[in-house]
Each structure stands twice: as structure tokens, then as C-alpha cells.
Image: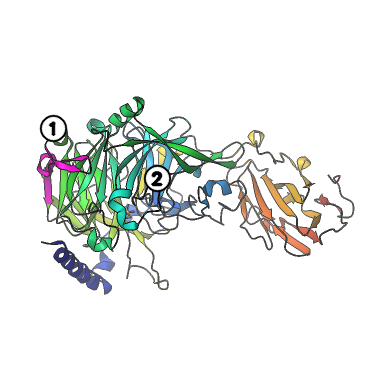
């Protein structure tokens, strides 16, 4: 079938499916059968079994749910500003969103990767990708805060990311858009894609103790679109597998032009070999520019530095790093089973799911069973790497997870279903509908050596008739299935934040016992503008900057009356929360601030910058209901005209006419 015909058939099938789901299916309301909903029930006061870390898509954030309840615990701000928590608004957090393009307050977060040791989740960190302005984030699971963000040079659309190796030696990030490298001349005609557009894959090292990231090296590849990736594990540890589409190297109307070939590729990368070349000095240092932003737990402050160099290995020159495995037809998901032997490619437009064998691939490479090359990269013969094909699995396969009991579960976007199949004989053994158009799946540990095969969650793009409508946009959703038996059984359905793509889950105890931080000890607060007690609170003027060293404790601020601020001043409220009890944040907001609130954790100092825009009295108050007298936790700032003689004064509890503290 030629490509156009196939696309046409695809469109008809997709159309038919959309028609059928536009009216409420007869059994949609009863898809949770009998008492199966009880399995998802977590009684009030009971803890969930798993933490579920879910990507927020175009919200740019990561959300944390409990499983099996589906209760939302927290939205962790990552790549987007979050006024609720002051993320990207406070002076301390602004540097986290710095890039070589300046402050970028939004991104598109698709994938979550939990750190691993010997192929098992270790509960330390969660990594996430920014698609739009290519970045990687590391979230510290002790604090549930974004601890680090590193920008990726030479990249566009950081989609094939972040995928980790078995010991989180590297978090790997492949570019979706190939583009002229940052170190090459980018002012070229767009239709010179084939010559001038290159792919770059970043291997970002992760310090085992601190988690600190660093771009160890990049692989320069021919221009294609890298879509998704997985590391090899166990026997295939040392390898990485990337799905590629647009191997046609089209630069316009990809819908048609990137669907020409019957097979695109899965690129197999021998990263241990790449490490050898790196050691042997085969890397070329290239001039680039990227931001590296790090959060300091002692100062509660981020710093951003711009780096200028990256080491690049060219895979068309260094012959034995990369191999192309043909894979039908615009593959999206690329997943490796818990044994490391089977590599599953999910061609969005393919009628089969090819399963490749790592052992066969190694033999094929040793025997040079190649079908020529793709711009210098050997193309392994399809049959020589193929273990077998899952026949007629469904329409539009996207992503596969594993249960560690010999079964794979693949999502089908077009036919809206999850299909369970046997990895050995490739027979489909079960299928269940999702409502509707499922993207990623998650089984806790489903990408590790040891999955826990109890639940599977499907993340759906379209919910149509499932929930109360909310204007032109309807919520996306997650659906929970019990997979402990032979047949999958839906037990819960809940809406999600933003658009969920990939998610991972970890046993609750693993995260709870990772040394979770409950408070920041005030004695260890190294913030340069901390006030460690009310006696240290003060207001000082440095030229046109006014620095307020403010403390917050139930239920007042010190100081809570400030006079002598003038038009044209930059006022910095450095608020230290003196509380040392778990879960007693205070908030801080002031009228007219072109900014957000602060939400200050116990023991922490956080800064809000404010430029008063008019003369008068400005109320400020605590935004987080902290005590019975929370509503009394408030104060005033008096703003006088520029050049006013009003002396700087401040206090809590005494008359403004007699400042209790000397003016500095
Ligand atoms: Cu399939 Cu961006 Cu992982 Cu979404 S991607 S579904
Ligand atoms: Cu402090 Cu409300």
C-alpha cells in the first residue's frame, strides 16, 4: 500500500472511531463493573500504596497522585511559573527558569523518569523534560522541589527525553527537531535539511550522591526526528534505543512527507563504546551556550550560570557507536522489557508491533548483516534483528509497559484500548477499552527490571462524555486498571492536571523512607538576608533599594508597619518563616505587586520584590491559613512621594511615631 492510500485508510478508520465516540457509548457508564471500584478505594485516613508522578504536558508541571485512590497531593512547579507557590516569582526561584534565551516562564513537560540503582527505582529523584526550550529538570524527592534545571544546546523540541540508564549514570535526551547545530551557521535555507540539519543526543551525567547533572557528551547524528527512547537493561545495559521518524528528512508537511517510507528506524546506541571514544579523546569541544540552574538547600536560593562548551562525538565518523534497525512506520514508543532482551517499536501507522531481539541484534552487528547505511550509520537487516511481530494488535500503537510476568501492555491511540500480549509467543491475550485515545501507560516499575504488576494506569487525551463538561475544553484523564489477574479490570477514572503524557510510580514506603525533609532547621538557614529571630528583623535602605528583613510566626509579621518607603524604590521583602513545625508555611502578599505571593516553608527565607506605583498605604497579609488568628496576620506599608523626608521606620506592636528600632 502506498503512503497516501495508507493515510487515507487511516483517516477513515480514525474518523469512524471519532464518530462512534462522539455519542456516549452504551456501556461507558458501566465500564467499572460490579464491586471492582472497591479496589481503588482508600478509606479516609489511610495512605495510598504508591506515589504516582505524572507529567503535566503543556502545564509545564509535574503532579503527584496517590494510587490506587487517584487523589491529587501536589503539583510540583518545574518549568512554568506557579503563583500559588511563588515559583518563578520570588527572587530565589527566578534563576531556575533562566536559559540562554533569558527567562523562559513556561514549557511542555512530557516524560517523567525516576532514578534507578541496578535497574530498580531508588526513590531519590524524578527527572523531567522540557520540550519547547530544551531543558532537563531534576526534582528532589526529599523535598518535592525542583532542584536543578540544565539547558540542552544543539537541540530543538527535547522530546526523546529524559530516559535514564540502569544506575542513572546518564539521563539521556534526544532532540525531536534536528536543526543546524548551535556551533554551525544556522542561517541556511530550510530546504537544505539533508545537508545542514543534524540531530544531537545529550548524555547527561548524574552525580550519585548529590544528583548534580552535567552534559558529559553529545552524539551528533544525521538529521531525523528522535521521538522516544529506552535504555538497555541487564544484558543490554550499555545500550540505548531511540525511535526515529522523518527518516525521509522532510522539512515541510511532515504529515504526508514524513510518512513516505514503509520503515523508519530504531537507532541502537552503544554508549559504553561512546564512553571509550570520549576517553580516547575523540570528542570535539564545541562552542555553545546553555544555562545550568541549581537550587541550594542551605540558602534556599537558585543560581544560574551560563556554560560555553560541550563535547561532541560524530557517529558517522566513529563507526561502531550507532546502528539503525528498520522499524515500521513512524515509530513513537520504543520500550525495552525487564530482561533487556526485547525491544518493542510502536509504529503509529503500522499494522504490526515489531519486537526486536537484543541477542539477534548483537549477532547481526558481529556478522555485518547490514542493508547499506543511512548517512554513514549501518542499517541492520530487519529480519536479522527481529524476534517477531505482534499481528493485528490494534490501531495506532504508542507506548508499552511491562509487568515482569512475561506480558507487555501497549496503548492504542486510534482504537482507544490497552492490549495485553505475551512477550514470548507474541499472542494478544486481553484488550480493554479506554475512554478515550490513550497515550502513555504506567505500571509501577514498568520500565525497570522489577515491575510491580498490580496496577496499570492509562493516560487519556480525550474524555468526551466522561465528566461534567467545562466549556470548550474538557479535562484529560487517567484510568486505573487492576492487572493482578488474567484480565485487566478498570477500577477508577480521575481527571488530571494539564495533559498527562508519561508517568511513573514508586512504592509509597520507598519515597517516605528516603529521608524526606520535613522542615528546614532555622539554624542551618544560610540565606544572606535571613532574620533568625524577631530581634534580627529590620529595614535598611541601600540607595533606592529598601530591604525588609521580615519574620513570620503565628500570627504576626515583624515588622508589620513600615514607613519611609518612597516612590521609585525597589522594595525587597525577605521573609523568614520562624516556624519549626511540619506543614506550617506562611504566605505573603502585598497590594498591587506585579508578582505573585510568597509561600514560605518552615525555616526558609523567601524574597518578594515590589515596586510601589503610587503614594499611599499598602496592606500586606499572610495568605496561608496558619492559625485561628491567621486573619490578624497583616500589616501596612506607607509609600511617600519621591524625595519625601519621611524617615524610614518599622515596628510591630508599637506606635509608628516612636520606632522601636533605629533607622539604618
Ligand atoms: Cu506519546 Cu510526548 Cu511520550 Cu505524549 S508522547 S502520549
Ligand atoms: Cu501566617 Cu496565616
Q: Position of residue 220 (x, y in %)?
A: 32, 41
Name the quarter where the C terminus is drawn. top right
Please rate how many residues cluster around mark 1, counting C-alpha atoms within 10 Å: few if below 14, some from 14 to 19, many from 20: some
Nearer the observer, 309 or 608: 309
Q: Is residue 129 left or right of residue 455?
A: right
Q: Position of residue 39 (x, y in %)?
A: 31, 52
Q: Is residue 405 visible?
A: no
Q: Residue 351 in magenta?
A: no
Q: Which of the two discs, 2 and 1, labels the residue nearer the N terminus?
A: 2
Q: Nearer the viewer, residue 511 or 267?
A: 267
Left or right of 660 on screen, residue 242: left
Q: CA distance from mark 2 to mark 1?
A: 37 Å
Q: What secondary structure is found at the residue carrying circle 1?
A: helix
Tell me if I can see residue 315 in this picture: yes
| Dot label at residue 96 | none
Can you say which quadrant of the picture contains the N terminus?
bottom left
Q: Nearer the viewer, residue 442 or 530?
A: 530
For the record, the magenta segment spans 363-390
Q: Residue 326 appears at what percent x and percent y? A: 17, 46
Q: Residue furthest top?
A: 280
Dot label at residue 363: 1
**Residue where numbered disc 2 is placed:** 184
| Disc number lying in front (2 or 1) | 2
Marks 2/1 in contact by CB < 8 Å: the verdict is: no
Instruction: Indicate yes or no whether the magenta region holds residue 366.
Output: yes
Q: Position of residue 109 (x, y in %)?
A: 41, 52
Crowding at dot 2, Cα within 10 Å, few <14 / some 14-19 / many 20+, comes out as: some
Amino acid at each position: 500500500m502506498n503512503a497516501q492510500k495508507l493515510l487515507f485508510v487511516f483517516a477513515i478508520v480514525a474518523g469512524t472511531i471519532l464518530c462512534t465516540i462522539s455519542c456516549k457509548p452504551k456501556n461507558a457508564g458501566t465500564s467499572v463493573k460490579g464491586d471492582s471500584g472497591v479496589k481503588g478505594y482508600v478509606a479516609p485516613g489511610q495512605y495510598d500504596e504508591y506515589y504516582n508522578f505524572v507529567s503535566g504536558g503543556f502545564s509545564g508541571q509535574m503532579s503527584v497522585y496517590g494510587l490506587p485512590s487517584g487523589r491529587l497531593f501536589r503539583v510540583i512547579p518545574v518549568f512554568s511559573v506557579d503563583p500559588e507557590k511563588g515559583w518563578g516569582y520570588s527572587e530565589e526561584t527566578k534563576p531556575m527558569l533562566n536559559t540562554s534565551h533569558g527567562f523562559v516562564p513556561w514549557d511542555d513537560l512530557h516524560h517523567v523518569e525516576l532514578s534507578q540503582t541496578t535497574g530498580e527505582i531508588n526513590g531519590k529523584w524524578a527527572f523531567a523534560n522540557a520540550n519547547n526550550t530544551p531543558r532537563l529538570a531534576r526534582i528532589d524527592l526529599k523535598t518535592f522541589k525542583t532542584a536543578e534545571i540544565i539547558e540542552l544546546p544543539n537541540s530543538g523540541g527535547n522530546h526523546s527525553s529524559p530516559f535514564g540508564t540502569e544506575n542513572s549514570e546518564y539521563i539521556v535526551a534526544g532532540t525531536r527537531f534536528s536543526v543546524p547545530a548551535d556551533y554551525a551557521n544556522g542561517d541556511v535555507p530550510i530546504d537544505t535539511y539533508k545537508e545542514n540539519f543534524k540531530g544531537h543526543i545529550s548524555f547527561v551525567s548524574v552525580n550519585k550522591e548529590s544528583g548534580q547533572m552535567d552534559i558529559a557528551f553529545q552524539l551528533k547524528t544525521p538529521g531525523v526526528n528522535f521521538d522516544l527512547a529506552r535504555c538497555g537493561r541487564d544484558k543490554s545495559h550499555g545500550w540505548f534505543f531511540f525511535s526515529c521518524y522523518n527518516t525521509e528528512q522532510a522539512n515541510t508537511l511532515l504529515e504526508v512527507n514524513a510518512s513516505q517510507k514503509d520503515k523508519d528506524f530504531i537507532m541502537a546506541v552503544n554508549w559504553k563504546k561512546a564512553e571509550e571514544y570520549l576517553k580516547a579523546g575523540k570528542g570535539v569541544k564545541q562552542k555553545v551556550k546553555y544555562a545550568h540552574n541549581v537550587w541550594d538547600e542551605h540558602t534556599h536560593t537558585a543560581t544560574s550560570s551560563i556554560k560555553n562548551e560541550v563535547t561532541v562525538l560524530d557517529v558517522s565518523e566513529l563507526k561502531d557507536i550507532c546502528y539503525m534497525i528498520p522499524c515500521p512506520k513512524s515509530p513513537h514508543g520504543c520500550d525495552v522489557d525487564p530482561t533487556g532482551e526485547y525491544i518493542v517499536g510502536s509504529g503509529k501507522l503500522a499494522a504490526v508491533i515489531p519486537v526486536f531481539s537484543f541477542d539477534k541484534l548483537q549477532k547481526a552487528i558481529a556478522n555485518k548483516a547490514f542493508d547499506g547505511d543511512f548517512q554513514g550509520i549501518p542499517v541492520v537487516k530487519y529480519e536479522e534483528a527481529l524476534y517477531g511481530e505482534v499481528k493485528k494488535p490494534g490501531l495506532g500503537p504508542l507506548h508499552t509497559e511491562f509487568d515482569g510476568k512475561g506480558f507487555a501492555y501497549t496503548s492504542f491511540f486510534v482504537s482507544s484500548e490497552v492490549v495485553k500480549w505475551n512477550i514470548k509467543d507474541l499472542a494478544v491475550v486481553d484488550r480493554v477499552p479506554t475512554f478515550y485515545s490513550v497515550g502513555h501507560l504506567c505500571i509501577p516499575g514498568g520500565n525497570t527490571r522489577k515491575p510491580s504488576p498490580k496496577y496499570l494506569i492509562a493516560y487519556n487525551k480525550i474524555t468526551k462524555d466522561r465528566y461534567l463538561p467545562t466549556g470548550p475544553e474538557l479535562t484529560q484523564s487517567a484510568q486505573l486498571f487492576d492487572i493482578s489477574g488474567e484480565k485487566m479490570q478498570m477500577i477508577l477514572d480521575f481527571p488530571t492536571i494539564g495533559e498527562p503524557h508519561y508517568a511513573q510510580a514508586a512504592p509509597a514506603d520507598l519515597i517516605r523512607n528516603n529521608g524526606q525533609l520535613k522542615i528546614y532547621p532555622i539554624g542551618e538557614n544560610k540565606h544572606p538576608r535571613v532574620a533568625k529571630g524577631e530581634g534580627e528583623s529590620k529595614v535598611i535602605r541601600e540607595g533606592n533599594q529598601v530591604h525588609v528583613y521580615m519574620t513570620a510566626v503565628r500570627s504576626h509579621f515583624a515588622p508589620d508597619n513600615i514607613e519611609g518607603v518612597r516612590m521609585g524604590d525597589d522594595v525587597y521583602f525577605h521573609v523568614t518563616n520562624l516556624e519549626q513545625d511540619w506543614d506550617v508555611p506562611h504566605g505573603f502578599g502585598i497590594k498591587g505587586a506585579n508578582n505573585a505571593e510568597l509561600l514560605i516553608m518552615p525555616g526558609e527565607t523567601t524574597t518578594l520584590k515590589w515596586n510601589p506605583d503610587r503614594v499611599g498605604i499598602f496592606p500586606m497579609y499572610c495568605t496561608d491559613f496558619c492559625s485561628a488568628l491567621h486573619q490578624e496576620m497583616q500589616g501596612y506599608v506607607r509609600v511617600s512621594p519621591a524625595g519625601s523626608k519621611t524617615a524610614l521606620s518599622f515596628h510591630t506592636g508599637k506606635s509608628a511615631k516612636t520606632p522601636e528600632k533605629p533607622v539604618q
